[in-house]
Amino acid sequence: MNTQVLYVSGTGNTAAVAKEIFQALPSSSKDIQELDHAKNPLSADCYFIGFWANRGTANVEILDFLSELHGKKVALFGTCGMGNSPEYYAEVEKKVRAFLPDDNQYFGSFFCQGKMPIRVREKYESMLGGERAQLATRLIKNFDEALFHPSSEDFRNAASFARTAFKNMEADL
Ligand SMILES: Cc1cc2nc3c(=O)[nH]c(=O)nc-3n(C[C@H](O)[C@H](O)[C@H](O)COP(=O)(O)O)c2cc1C
């Protein structure tokens, strides 16, 4: 089965996960591209589509691309500043998946945390003296944890997700 890994990545976290997913795919016919540069993006049978969480959803270019897919086997993956929160990841997945037309087959998603630019921490620090100090403390803790992600464990989990999803795609020929 012809398999395409397509992703968008602003600072490299999602790109790194995309590469792990690509390497793990036991397909003899596979390709990986940044969505911007995708050539013939509608020609594959299976898609692993990656994005970074942007205000709780994905960039419009990802949502537009998903909405154009028909009759494909599709899995999603993403990186989020928010760490270790299956509930949050499920919310992001739901919002993004809503753009995938029903005539595609969906094979699940993988999410992990991804480090954020230092200006984000600076913004949280500026909140420390005010009414939202407690929230700022939590956000700074999350920011500092994110510095270690995607981690080698995240990469292993992404690879394992890719192998399982691909196996299911194949079984469902
Ligand atoms: C403008 C902007 C909006 C973001 N919105 C969210 C968000 O809503 N939820 C979240 O968990 N992380 C959010 N993040 C953090 C990124 O999703 C996270 O750092 C991601 O790993 C970046 O991936 P990349 O390196 O592939 O660009 C945001 C980052 C930016 C720059």
Image: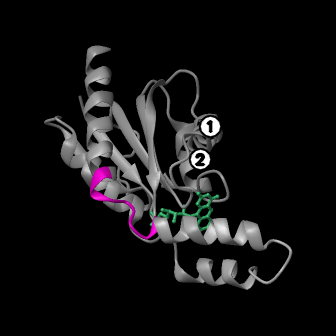
Residue 29's quadrant in the figure? Answer: top left
Can residue 115 be seen here? The reply is: no
- 161 horizontally vs 97: left or right: left
Query: Residue 76: x percent and y percent?
Result: 45, 40
**Residue 150 is covered by the magenta coloring:** yes
Q: Is mark 1 within 8 Å of ligand 1?
A: no
Query: Residue 138: x percent and y percent?
Result: 65, 65
Total labels: the figure holds 2
Label 1: few (<14), some (14–19) or many (≥20) C-alpha neighbours in 10 Å: some
Q: Nearer the viewer, mark 2 or mark 1?
A: 1
Q: At 60% across and 42% down in the image, what residue appears?
A: 96
- Upstream in sequence: badge 2 or badge 1: 2
Q: Is residue 53 above or below residue 73?
A: below
Q: Is mark 2 within 8 Å of ligand 1?
A: no
Dot label at residue 64: 2
Q: Dot 2: what SS?
A: helix
- Most frequent secondary structure within the magenta stretch: loop
Q: Is residue 58 above or below residue 170?
A: below
Query: Residue 49: x percent and y percent?
Result: 43, 45
Instruction: Mark 2 and mark 1 in contact? Answer it, CB < 8 Å.
Output: yes
Q: CA distance from mark 2 to mark 1?
A: 8 Å
Which residue type carries mark 1? Phe
Query: Residue 157: x percent and y percent?
Result: 31, 43
**Residue 105 is covered by the magenta coloring:** no
Which quarter holds ligand 1? bottom right
Kindly give the residue lying farthest to the top in the view shown.
172
In the image, which residues are magenta? 146-153
Which residue type carries mark 2? Asp
Kindly give the residue lying farthest to the right in the view shown.
131
Can residue 30 be seen here? The reply is: yes
Q: Which residue is mark 1?
A: 99
